[in-house]
Amino acid sequence: MAKEKNIEKKPVIGRLLSYTKPCAALVVPAVISAVVSVALSLYTPILVGRGIDYIIGKNNVDFEGVKRYVLLIVVTVILSAIFNWVMSLCTYKITYRAVSDMRAQLYAKLNKLPLGYIDSTAHGDIIARMSVDVETISDGLLQCFSQFLTGIVTIVGTIFFMLRINVGIAVVVILITPLSLFVAAFITKLCHDKFREQSAVRGELSGCIEELVGGQKIVKAFAYEDRAQARFEEINGRLYKCGVLAQFYSALTNPCTRFVNGIVYAATGIFGAISVISGAPGAMSVGQIATFLSYANQYTKPFNEITGVITELQAAFASARRVFDVLDETEEIPEKEPPAPANADGRVDINNVSFSYKPEQKLLENVDLSVKSGQRIAVVGPTGCGKTTLINLLMRFYDVREGSIEVGGEDIRNMRRSELRAMYGMVLQDTWIFTGTIRENIAYGKPDATEEEILAAAKMCHCHSFIRRMHDGYDTMVSEDGGSLSQGQKQLLCIARVMLTNPPMLILDEATSSIDTRTEQKIQSAFAKLMKGKTSFIIAHRLSTIKDADVILVMKDGNIIEQGDHESLLEKGGFYANLYNSQFEHV
């Protein structure tokens, strides 16, 4: 198991360090500053020892000598602090640049991942990877670059100075101290898996919180509070257990190493005192024993810091694996180069298309459809029949498994996704408003829109009046979770957003589901103007809104079972007729 873990760590360490390459020029000054700072701090005990030796006895003190060494100590400490500050500045820049690049790469990766990954992964867990896990990596790298670097230099430097003062006692210190590393290594094995488990459960908890807080109205509406609390407490309990064990194991490191360090310090004091008392030739002076005790303390201190760094790195490695898991996910199918030119003439051909989100669960099978330019295509059918899936394939949110979809006679897999999606204006049943002004929300798809264009789009979809009544008008700040807008008003803004872009083709997925009947009639009139001459796909459950569609597709179990206009489908007396009549039989 240990070998497997070491193999697993190597690529993680290498990948983490690769993010420091843009700031590689800062590594040299950081190392030089660390060496100089530590060297000066190690030179200080020598000055202290020499100063002590000038205190010969009662009423026998060489004050001039003491004064000289006090001044040297002050200068040395100040210079050590300055170089330590330079080292910290360099390491902070290296760390935060690396973490910033990692976070940017992670977000860019999310934009390249297929929607299937986003749909199948808890959004809270994704957020946790971008925030909590990246911050944990930041803490680990910072500890590694600062304490680990100075710790290694301190150990090497103290060994050098101790050997110069007294080889015998130095050997005793050097032989006993590594025991703390063996202790730390043993404890590290225990806490590694727990830190990894802690990161995973923390992501699960973030997903749970995001889900329950985002759906708080539903939670309360269905009196789900107690069950939600129980679910939260179950995950929180698991996080508590693995977190306590991880921290317990890691907390053992410091006291265990300090115990070993205490033995080292005591041994140094005993052997040093014997040397001073013996008075033999070459015996240590009182000042030298004071210096040596200081070195013994400084020599053992980095071992405590390094073991602490190891604990931080364990958490950082666990978080890094979660981040790298996302970065290693398979991206969307690459676009072909050079891409085919986008031809937005409104023709759409669906040729023998089959698709399923999971291979074992069939959804769309052998779907064929030919749409002429300017036609209005309505798609109806029971829930789960594949209506929204068909829209996802048209927008290339998902790629077809079999068959092809052509726009303007060209397979959409040969086009740039951005150019294909720019051909469509899509209004979904689920509204999306980002934090910003109403003006910015309307101009989301056309940031360079003029004030006149924004006002015209708002008036066309009948939201100008309620915007004008708001305190700051079009400069009013809104958000998805804010209470300043009703659900219907949010949907009107989404419709205005599409009207402003004036795309050649439209997709309306229950676009007026949250709007009152009177406003819906006005919106339908606006849509009629907007759809004039444009190919439009309309998904609707209220069949009264699609009577004027050129073609109505009736879907069931992933297949188009009926096709025609409203009147011809009613005359057939088939599935559509039954569906239509069922909506009015109780009216």
Image (cartoon, helix red, strand yellow):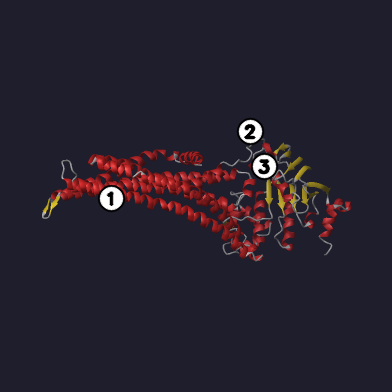
Q: In this view, does 530 lie to the left or right of 182?
A: right
Secondary element at image label 3: helix
Secondary element under disc 1, as helix, strand or loop, is helix
Q: Where does the C terminus fall, quadrant-wise?
A: bottom right
Say which residue label 3 marks.
420
Packing grade of label 1 (10 A; few <14, some 14-19, many >=20) is: few
Outermost residue, top side: 338
In the rendered structure, which amino acid carries the disc numbered 3?
A: Leu
Mark 1 vs mark 3: in front? 1
- Callout 2–callout 1 Cβ contact below 8 Å: no
Foreground: 35 or 46? 46
Residue closer to the observer: 115 or 303: 303
Label 2, label 1: how many angstroms apart (C-alpha)? 74 Å
Q: In this view, does 122 lie to the left or right of 101?
A: right
The three-letter amino acid code for the residue at tag 1 is: Ala
What residue is at 68 percent from the left and 38 percent from the top? Answer: 413
Other-residue count near label 3 (Cα within 10 Å), few / some / many at <14 / 14–19 / ≥20: many
Q: In the rendering, at what x and y percent does residue 472 appear?
A: 57, 62
Using the image, tell me which numbered label, if any, was put on residue 266: 1
Determine if residue 297 is in view.
no
Residue 152 lies in quadrant: top left
Above or below — where is 21 with respect to 480?
above
Q: Where is residue 379 in the image (x, y as percent from the top left)?
A: 77, 50
Callout 2 crowding tier (Cα within 10 Å): few <14, some 14–19, many ≥20: few
Residue under numbered circle 2: 338
